[in-house]
Amino acid sequence: MQKSSARKTIEIIIFTLFMFFLFAPLFSMGIWSVALRWYWPNTFPQEIGLDYWLQALGITKSLTLGAVNVIPAFLLSLGIAIIVVIITMAIAIPAGYSLAKLRIPALLKGMILILFLLPRAFPQQPVFINLMLMFNKIGLTGTVFGVILVHLVVGLVFAVWITASTFSSIPPELEEAARSVGASRLKAFFKVTLPISTPGLIASAVFVFLTSMDEFTGTFFVGIPFVTTLPMTLYSASGSNIQFASVIAILLLIPSILFMIIIQKFLKAEHLGGIGG
Amino acid sequence: MAILKVNSLSKNFGKVKAVQEVSFEAPEGKVLSLLGPSGCGKTTTLRCIAGFENPDEGEISLDDRRITHIPPEKRGIGMVFQNYALWPHMTVYANLAFGLQIKKIPKDEIIKKIKKVLNMVRLEGYENRYPRQMSGGQQQRIAMARALVFEPEIMLLDEPLSNLDAQLREEMRFEFTELQKKLGITAVYVTHDQAEALVISDKIVILNQGEIVQSGSPKEIYSNPKNKFVAGFIAVTSFIDGNVDSFSNEKKKVMVKTDDGYVIYGFNSNFSIGQPVSIAIRMNTLKIFQDESKKVNMFRGKIIQSSYLGNTIDYKIKMGKWEIRTNAEAKYDYDIGEEVIFYLPPEEIIVTSQK
């Protein structure tokens, strides 16, 4: 009895600390996003209001707040992220499948996987500055297409690795069983392998989506001055205007949280899948 | 129902010769077992028949249809996998219906066929279960049902019972045999379990290192193993090497002399004088005697190991440089180091070739 209540106390303390570390920064950001006047030594803002929110969401247009409408930037980020996810998965699914299921010599397989990892193996700035110089020559800098290409490089790293490991975790007999009852290779893939690997593929797609939403360095070098994604807006606001920066940060969090919920749902499905005998 | 012919099949994986020049014929409506230790090429052979591996050389045919290089989905061969390979995201119904739907069989007929096959494997009413909701034995039966439901000409089974516990395995052996006889389907059964192979097979093909060592009926193989390897695989536990010395009166009785002077009699007329042979002794062949009442094959030895099994005792007896294992009744209770007199009945020992 004594022991369990002591244990309970410790659990509560750990849980409280956990919630504090998880939510305190968010909470502070939430307060900042509605603080109109907040000077030392006040614990809470002297004046609160939704002015920065209204401004950022494009509902009011004031020249004094130093905040701009971020809806176009948000939509641009969202659009780029969706396109990046589609293209990345269209490449990563066949690539991951081939790496996992076809008889490729181990050395070649390792080389291909390393190749996909390479852009991440070096400091990001030099990589993207080089990319910018190359893109300059062919007129890709400052275009949305150029930015999408940069995001693809980043996204493919995760996507290929995750899909390859997802496919290789599926026993080959499952596909062979489908073929033995009359399914073609393609049918076996679409009816057996793909549905079973859905959780892994969704997880991989969500990862790609989130990295694209948050991607800054590559977008900065390749996209300026014409492509302004949400992280770029955040960067230009973060030095001078904490309220505005907080609003953008919260906006950036929304898709992340939504997708975390989706991931959780699908990961549960994977447990239920009970692969193997 | 069909006759499966495999003709000088070879398959290499890089430098590994997995299957070499393997030929056999699976008789119509019978069970043929491919038996051998792991890595002997039995599974590779089966996978070549199923179409999951492309053989380097050789021909495979079903009746008069050559199937060596056609894709697995066009062969019409049912397959049962060691890990069952049921599709975890589908119900039992969907698992069984999958192949039938591909064949565009009308729905009401599919329902009828599934009902019938579930009845056959004694799992009526399991249509809506998921594989994870069933025990290993039940999953195994569904895997068999899935291979049978589209009425294949021939059925392949890759160690289908090896994931089950001993008792269930024995039950399933009989169930499989019953089902197979009822359907009269030709089956090729891969196993490393000699007891299983003896029970279920009409014909056994023994493989070692990718080559066929011996093939024949279970009885032939059990009573007349071709060499030491086959004998060792079919439950022989002790060997004594020697040379054929002479044949006695009835011509079939052979006298074998070991290099340390033992003379052992057995029956086998397939050898010539001077040929090196091996005396193979099963677990319960050796009889411990209290007196020297027989004229031949009486020997003395020393108990060097014993394990008590309740109604019997396992002894390891040393005779010269040879060690013989035996399973004696518990009334023969000896201590380690004690000397015993024993008899090797000539009609029960096997004379086989050393290689």
Image: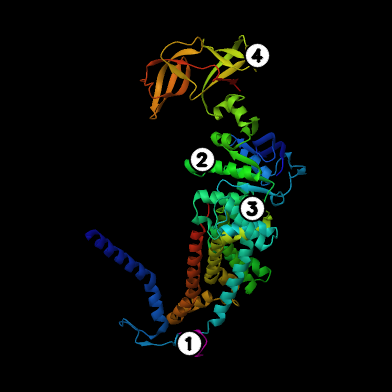
User: Which residue in the protein does label 3 denote?
Assistant: B149
Q: Quadrant of residue B277?
A: top right
**Relative to A72, is B340 on the left or the right?**
left
Q: Is residue B139 magenta?
A: no
Chain for disc number 3: B
**Do callouts 3 and 1 mark residues in contact (Cβ within 8 Å)?**
no
Chain for disc number 2: B
**Residues packed near mark 3 inside 10 Å, few (<14), some (14 to 19) or many (20 plus):** many
**Relative to A41, is A195 on the left or the right?**
right
Do the residues indicated by labels 3 and 4 lie within the same chain of the protein? yes
Location of residue A96 in the rendering, given as x and y in whole percent from the top left corner? 60, 57
Q: CA distance from mark 2 to mark 3?
A: 24 Å
Give the mark nearer the N terminus: 3 vs 4. 3
User: Which residue in the protein does label 1 denote?
Assistant: A54
A235 or B112: nearer the viewer: B112
Q: Quadrant of the C terminus of chain B?
A: top right
Q: CA distance from mark 1 to mark 2?
A: 75 Å
Magenta region: A53-67
Do the residues indicated by labels 4 and 1 lie within the same chain of the protein? no
Q: CA distance from mark 3 to mark 1?
A: 65 Å
Residue type of the residue flagged with mark 3: Val
Q: Which callout, 1 or 2, points to the residue nearer the camera?
A: 2
User: Which residue in the protein does label 2 denote?
Assistant: B170
**SS under mark 2:** helix
Q: Which mark is residue B272?
A: 4
Location of residue A181 in the rendering, given as x and y in whole percent from the top left corner? 66, 53
Do the residues indicated by labels 2 and 3 lie within the same chain of the protein? yes
Residue type of the residue flagged with mark 4: Ser
**Which residue is located at x 60 percent, y 35 percent?**
B35
Q: CA distance from mark 4 to mark 1?
A: 105 Å
Report if residue A176 is visible in the image: no
